[in-house]
């Protein structure tokens, strides 16, 4: 899968000859998960992994107390299955200013605009 702006595409096989692959671009369903609480890491990770197995593209936005999930031991697993954005204001407000998290770079710290974009472009949107 590759990302073209907000659209995510995959490769499919030719409908007339199942043994002949061709690059026909079709939309892949996108799941957005907004996390606002600190106690749902197992649910977030389970949903993201299940969606990935089902061929979905996953975006996760951590805001409010959800930014505490960045401190969980298995947080890096989320980075492997989803595009993760962290509300920078919430991260600072929850006492993590200047605290580095393995696997995160500056572009992971975003504003609420990323959440708004996710709502507008996802086929399904969950709040935990």
Image (cartoon, grey):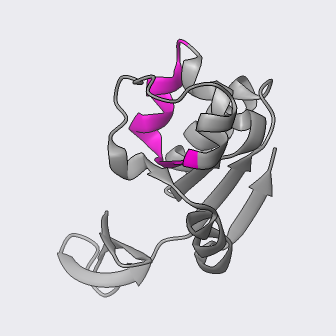
Q: Locate residue 48, reporting x and y percent.
A: 59, 42
Q: Which residue occupies the extreme top position in the image?
A: 73
Tally the marks. 0
Residue 63 against residue 6 in the figure, above or below: above
- 88 relative position to 24: left or right: right
Residue visible at 53% across and 58% down in the picture: 56
Residue visible at 81% across and 35% down in the picture: 37
User: Which quadrant does the C terminus fall into?
Assistant: top right
Residue visible at 28% across and 84% down in the picture: 24
Q: Locate residue 118, reporting x and y percent.
A: 60, 68
Q: Would residue 95 be seen by someone viewing this image from the given angle?
A: yes
Residue closer to the observer: 30 or 128? 128
Residue closer to the observer: 64 or 3? 64
Residue visible at 43% across and 36% down in the picture: 79
Residue 9 against residue 37 in the figure, above or below: below
Residue closer to the observer: 20 or 33? 33
Residue closer to the observer: 74 or 110? 110
Q: Locate residue 110, reporting x and y percent.
A: 50, 56
User: Which quadrant does the N terminus fall into?
Assistant: bottom left
Residue 61 against residue 10 in the figure, above or below: above
- 77 relative position to 34: left or right: left
- 85 relative position to 123: left or right: left
Q: Locate residue 53, reporting x and y percent.
A: 52, 44
Magenta-drawn segment: 73-88
Q: Quadrant of residue 30?
A: bottom right
Magenta-colored stretch includes residue 80? yes
Q: Would residue 87 be seen by someone viewing this image from the given angle?
A: no
- 109 relative position to 113: left or right: left
Residue 108 against residue 20 in the figure, above or below: above
Q: Quadrant of residue 18?
A: bottom left
Magenta-colored stretch includes residue 83? yes
């Amino acid at each position: 899968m590759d990302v073209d702006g907000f659209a995510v595409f995959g490769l499919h096989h030719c409908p007339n000859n199942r043994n002949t692959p061709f690059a026909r671009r079709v939309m892949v369903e996108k799941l957005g998960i907004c996390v606002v609480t600190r106690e749902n890491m197992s649910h977030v990770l389970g949903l993201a992994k299940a969606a990935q197995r089902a061929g979905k593209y996953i975006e996760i936005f951590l805001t409010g107390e959800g930014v505490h999930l960045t401190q969980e031991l298995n947080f890096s697993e989320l980075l492997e299955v989803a595009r993760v954005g962290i509300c920078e204001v919430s991260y600072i407000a929850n006492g993590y200013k200047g605290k580095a998290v393995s696997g995160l770079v500056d572009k992971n710290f975003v504003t609420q605009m990323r959440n708004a974009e996710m709502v507008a472009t996802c086929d399904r949107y969950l709040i935990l």
